[in-house]
Image (cartoon, grey):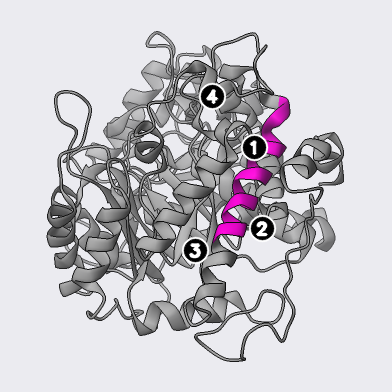
Amino acid sequence: MAEIRAKANRNESAKLFQGSATIDHAQDPALYPKGFPHFVRGRDSLREHITQLFTSRIAYYDGAMGTMIQKHTLEEEDFRGARFSDWDTLVKGNNDMLSISKPELIKDIYSKYLESGSDMIGTNTFSSTTIAMADYKMENLVYELNYNGARLARIACDEMTAKDPTRPRFVVGAIGPTNRTASISPDVEDPACRNCDFDELVEAYYEQVVAMMDGGADILIVETIFDTLNAKAAVFAIGEYLEHTGLDIPLFISGTLVDQSGRTLSGQTGEAFYNSMRHAKPMCVGLNCALGAKQMAPFLKRLSAAAECFVHVYSNAGLPNAMGGYDDTPEDMARDNKEFADEQLVNMIGGCCGSTPPHIKAIKEATEKLLPRPLPDTVMPTMRLSGLEPLTIEDCVNTIGLPFVNVGERCNIAGSLKFKKLMMAGKYGEAMDIAKQQVEDGAHVIDVNLDDGMLDGLAAMQTFIKTAVTEPDVSKRPFMIDSSKFEIVEAGLKWCQGKPIINSISLKVGEKLFIEHANIIRKHVPLS
């Protein structure tokens, strides 16, 4: 964390904020009265405040940042400003850099959403990672981009709160998916090929989190999740940040189902996506982007039924038209989102692509008197796993209907001579046929064990999992990552977007190392 701050250009941020590049955003404890609905940073628990907010009324998020920027029809020189006039690559379209080159524009957009009724606004940081900014050769500006994006939102929220302290406004640090995907091969000839890895994503997300928290974010949201493995890397980075700082930062998680199949780009259903992300203990989970509210309705209902936490939605303003624009009027969005509120499916509503302050205002006016979704009752713990599809262990039965979990053991070197020969020959494609047959024969879980003295188990596990997750007939089932060597278990976890079973860790390594291993696993998957 100190290293990230040290390499940041704090002098430029200080110039932008009148000589102050503070990372301390605590307020005077006596600034506002004690007790809900008032809130003072450093005095009050944000988690308790949001809980009271989400259980007392529907809260409102903002709408699209990109749509508002597009309305200004900015040209290349507008994006550059004075500071980037000599930048050696084209930058038009890099909306995040406007937090540096045109801060007054970004703050004005924040303020317009707050004036329309937003309780929370997302920062202009959707692409502010070293991975995404490589397209503009701006990797070294990532701290500044995130700090400034959050700091401008912090100023706008504090100004609006000062006008009406009974409606405090909050900054949500927006963490996008990057322009890479850890679960999908970019090479049709090689299903195990990837253009990024888990550790690379964690490092990029960690730097982003440090900077936006330094800039004054209250909440973190991992949003527009089209690949759950990317999101798992993001929440791993957030977990590391929270562990290093000792802070309690509410986490929101927002998935994107790309079409009417109700699946993410990497193939998961909404319920499987939720099972994969439960270990992060999100305060709020929901859906955004890709679909309009009308198209999103059946999937939101299913997610709302599955979620043990609060639920949000911020849909597009309908589906894109032939010109790539969005046609839903504020009245259209208000009507369709009101159905979510009528059915008590949500605790927070906002807008995504195509939405504007008038859309948020209309949604608020249509739903503000309706009740929020109540938190579900506490029930007996269940073991929820996921591949591309969800699996609840307590629901598993055998062919005659009795409770039984069928674990396919034929992708275990010790359980199949045929599989062993294929692995020794590096024939991963043929090995997938064995996995598929197990699924067809009724396996609920696919065990994967590649421990053999004559095989590089670490490399083999990674290649097998990366190949298997691209095969829907295999990866619809959860995996059991099976090895006596912890480094192989961990390597398998880093390529698995679903929630697998770990088999296993042992006290044979000593209590201290056992606890260390258990804690690492808990950062990847929940211990159900």
Residues at badges 3 and 4 in contact (C-beta under 8 Å)? no
- For the residue marked with disc 2, what is the amino acid? Gly
Residue 12 at what x, y percent from top left?
A: 78, 36
**Secondary structure mainly formed by the magenta segment:** helix
Cα separation, mark 2 vs mark 3, equals 20 Å
For label 2, the SS is loop
Relative depth, front residue between 357 and 425: 357
The residue labelled by disc 1 is 145
Mark nearest the camera among 1 and 3 is 1
Q: In the rendered image, is residue 390 in sight? A: no
Mark nearest the camera among 2 and 3 is 2
Which stretch did the figure color magenta? 140-156
Residues at badges 2 and 3 in contact (C-beta under 8 Å)? no
Relative depth, front residue between 407 and 193: 193
Cα separation, mark 4 vs mark 2, equals 24 Å
Left/right placement of residue 285 relative to residue 257 reads right
- For the residue marked with disc 1, what is the amino acid? Leu
Cα separation, mark 3 vs mark 4, equals 35 Å
The residue labelled by disc 3 is 282
Cα separation, mark 1 vs mark 3, equals 25 Å
Compared to residue 420, the image places residue 88 above or below, namely above
What residue sits 72% from the left and 74% below the top? 27
The residue labelled by disc 2 is 216
Mark 3: give few (<14), some (14-19) or many (20+) Cα within 10 Å: many
Q: In the rendered image, is residue 382 in sight? A: yes
Q: Which of pointers 4 and 1 lies earlier in the amino acid sequence? A: 4
- For the residue marked with disc 4, what is the amino acid? Phe
Q: Which of pointers 4 and 2 lies earlier in the amino acid sequence? A: 4
Mark 2: give few (<14), some (14-19) or many (20+) Cα within 10 Å: many
The residue labelled by disc 4 is 79
Mark 4: give few (<14), some (14-19) or many (20+) Cα within 10 Å: many
